[in-house]
Amino acid sequence: MPTLLNYTGDDEFHPTSMEDFPCFLPISSRINVCFQPNKRFRTNLKIPFLGDDTKPSIDDLPDECLFEIFKRLDNGKSKSSCACVSKRWLMLLSSIRMEKTENNGYLTRHLEGKKATDIRLAAIAIGINNNGGLGKLSIKGMNSICRVTNVGLTSIAYGCSSLRALSLWNIASIGDEGLLEIAKECHLLEKFDVCQCPLISNRALIAIAEGCSNLTVLSIESCPNIGNEGMQAIGRSCSKLESISIKDCSLIGDSGVSSLISSACSSLHKVKLQGLNITDFSLAVIGHYGNVVTHLTLCSLKNVSEKGFWVMGNAQALKLLISLTISACQGVTNVSLEAIGNGCRSLKQICLQKCSFVSGDGLAAFSKAARTLESLQLEECNRITISGIIGLLTNHESNLKSLVLVKCSGIKDTALQFPLPSYSSSLRWVSIRNCTGFGAESLALVGRLCSQLQHLDLVGLYGLTDAVFVPLLESCEGLVKVNLSGCLNLTDESIIALARLHGATLQLVNLDGCRKITDQSLVAIADNLLVLNELDVSNCAVSDRGLIALARAQHINLSILSLAGCCGITGTSLPCLEILGKTLVGLNLEGCNSISNGSIEVLVENLWRCDILV
């Protein structure tokens, strides 16, 4: 019997029932045999019979035996070879903790949608260790399509101790268990980004904080089970934390944010808080402990009042703050904005979005206090007037470089209440987008005050006409980039003037949607623009004649050309496009319905280095 059953015969059998082995004994037999309690019978184990011609296979061994064999493989190449045999072997190998190596971890892997599976993660864990080690891993799911679980993440933990950056997006099947293994094995982790992972809780974040003390960047978004305890653990354990972003996490409140900010006050440079249930208290803590904070973003904080922003500014700790973004916060008023200007003496960039209680007076008071300001962006701040903008420009004659106005409906052509000062602004970049009240008088003021402009961005200004735009061009010295998309009332007269006055410096021209622009403009561009790099005439009234002029210009070396929606461009322009295509890296022909499919195919074949969008 020992020979038949192929066992050592020492002490493995003891009296018990043999009902589980009817194939070895007659039905009438009453012989009793048993296994020791610690021996588990495997129904999938194939036992060879005498006279059986079946060849034994290593695959007949149970997982535990294969596991012990694989553990004893001495190098990564052997493990990689075994991993190629079957999915079963691959998953077994990926469940083995690999020895810590000195890999630099410079390789990056990104899995998205259907490609994000446990099998792929196991293959990465086994194969990448011999090629420098995994440094960055990004997994982006698509709801139910993503098939990554804790098993795959555990494989990465066991095989990729060199991991320094981990990003998990929209994965409903990953919970705390996988991240617990990451925390145990990947002690070099520096960047952790988790978004829309509902099963991840404080337990995982606490483990990351305790196991990954080198963490410098943390981003958490839409994780409903992460709360204050996780934030407190990060503050206690991650002394090197430099950047924190928390968005739409309903369980994170004042106690978590304030504990994190106060604990990491010596290293934290960037802070972003959005859609959180925090109050004035958290902003007061930022104002008192943000000694080294340089970039601060506060969005959709509905429970923060004017007092919170006022205290944050007057606390005087944000002396190193360079960039400030505030969006959809009703607590930002003229009073609190002035306090921020007084307290943030190094501020260079500020962006205010949907701050409906800030008026021109508040903007003027802020600009007087924030003397180092170089860039201002206002979006949907509908109480801002043209008088406030002029006051801002006069207060920052020497240092303001960029002004962006988006959908500010309060800016209208009205008579100024004070005489316009005579000076030359330092502005280099002006962007006015979809400000419907911005008309002739407002633009004339911009022209008088901004003679040193290089970048001019006027988008969706239906009131902009040749009579207004040409004098503006004449007041500027050397424009480099001009965007006039959506300015429906501009004609060839403006573009001819633009080419004549600024042809030596213009590198980018965008005329998308300027329906009155014709081939005359393209001819002027071909004749005068010497360093043009990007040209967009989408949805303009141009035709083959204009393209012929561009192709004939010896000095034209375009890299980007967009002709989308230009029905006047036909197959006749194919030779011209091939000439221009010698330098092109991007060509947009979407909606050019007058060009046949055959011509497009020929063009794609000839311009194989160019990315063509059709």
Image (cartoon, grey):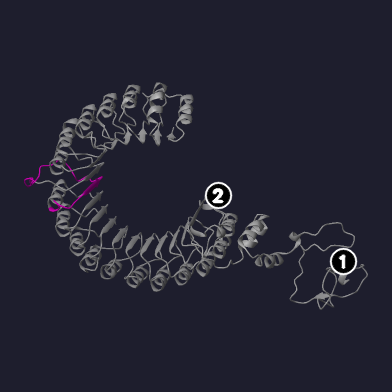
Residue 139 seen in render = no
Residue 418: say if magenta: yes
Residue 368 lies, in percent from the top left, at 14, 57
Please report the bounds of the magenta region as a residue range: 395-422
Q: Which mark is residue 22?
A: 1
**What amino acid is found at the position of numbered circle 1 in the picture?**
Pro
Q: Nearer the viewer, mark 2 or mark 1?
A: 2
Q: Is residue 122 rendered to the left or right of residue 404?
A: right
Q: Residue at x 35, y 70 (%)?
A: 264
Q: Name the image quarter holding residue 321.
A: bottom left
Q: Distance of mark 2 from mark 1, alpha carbons? A: 47 Å
Q: Is residue 218 rendered to the left or right of residue 87?
A: left
Q: Earlier in the sequence, mark 2 or mark 1?
A: 1
Residue 345 seen in render = yes
Location of the C terminus (image quadrant): top left
Residue under label 2, please give it. 114
Total number of numbered discs in the rendering: 2
**What amino acid is found at the position of numbered circle 2 in the picture?**
Lys
Residue 147 lies, in percent from the top left, at 57, 54
Q: Secondary structure at mark 2?
A: helix
State whether the magenta stretch is mostly helix, strand or loop. loop
